Each structure stands twice: as C-alpha cells, then as structure tokens.
Image (cartoon, grey):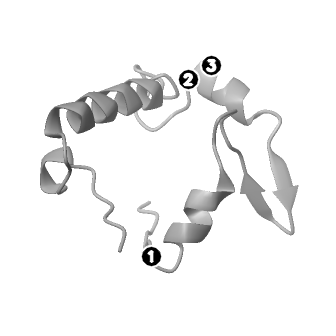
Amino acid sequence: MANIDDDCDALDVPDPEVTAETFSQLEGERFKFEDEDDDGALSKEGQAFIDDIEEDDGLKTKYSSSASKDIIYFLQDEWSINFFLDD
C-alpha cells in the first residue's frame, strides 16, 4: 500500500530525519517553479520547464530528467485526486 501525504510527520518511515530532509529538498525544488510575486503563477524557470511539453490526445505530461513513469503506474490504482477551479 502506498501512502501519499504532504506532511512528512504523518508517514511511517524508518528514518524520520532523512524523510524530513528529502521533503525539504523537494519543497525547495518546487518553489523554483513558482513566481514569488504572483501567487499561482509560474516563475521563469517553471515556464522554461514546460515550454517543450509533450501532448498526446490532449494530455500534457512533463517529467524531470530523473523522473520515471513507473511510480505513477504503481500509485495510480492506490489514490485519486479531485480538484476544481474556483473563479
């Protein structure tokens, strides 16, 4: 079973310090893609990342150089996401 959470303290992990450090590093990487002056907008680095995005039947996907689709295939039957846009 896969657990997905944005709170590293909520996860049952063998080494909480390593997990907290990894979460911190991932948050730092994510922040690089956000415009600090415009909430919800992409930074220049974020825009550059998606400029060469691939599209297949209307679905756009973009992976970092070290990303793997394997984790998505593993998790896709374990979780779902519901979202809506608020105007």
Provide the residue designation for mark 1.
Answer: 80
Q: Residue furthest bottom?
A: 77
Direction from residue 11 to residue 42 in the image, left or right: right
- Circle 2: element type: loop
Q: Which mark is residue 44?
A: 3
Q: Which mark is residue 50?
A: none
CB of mark 3 within 8 Å of CB of mark 1? no
Give the alpha-carbon distance from disc 2 to disc 3, as whole Å.
4 Å
CB of mark 1 within 8 Å of CB of mark 2? no
**Which quadrant would residue 45 be assigned to in this image?**
top right
Give the alpha-carbon distance from disc 1 to disc 2, as whole Å.
27 Å
Image depth: mark 3 or mark 1 in front: 1
Q: Amino acid at mark 1?
A: Ser
Q: Residue 12: give x, y in percent of width and height.
A: 17, 57
Q: Residue 33: give x, y in percent of width and height.
A: 52, 28
CB of mark 2 within 8 Å of CB of mark 3? yes
Direction from residue 22 to residue 80 in the image, left or right: right
Q: The N terminus is located in which quarter?
A: bottom left
Among numbered discs 1 and 2, the one appearing first in the sequence: 2
Q: Is residue 80 above or below residue 18?
A: below
- Circle 3: element type: helix
- Circle 1: element type: loop
Direction from residue 45 to residue 87 in the image, left or right: left
Q: Amino acid at mark 2?
A: Ser
Q: Residue at x 46, y 63 (%)?
A: 85
Q: Amino acid at mark 3?
A: Lys
Q: Residue at x 26, y 28 (%)?
A: 21
Please tell me which residue lies in front, 12 or 44. 12
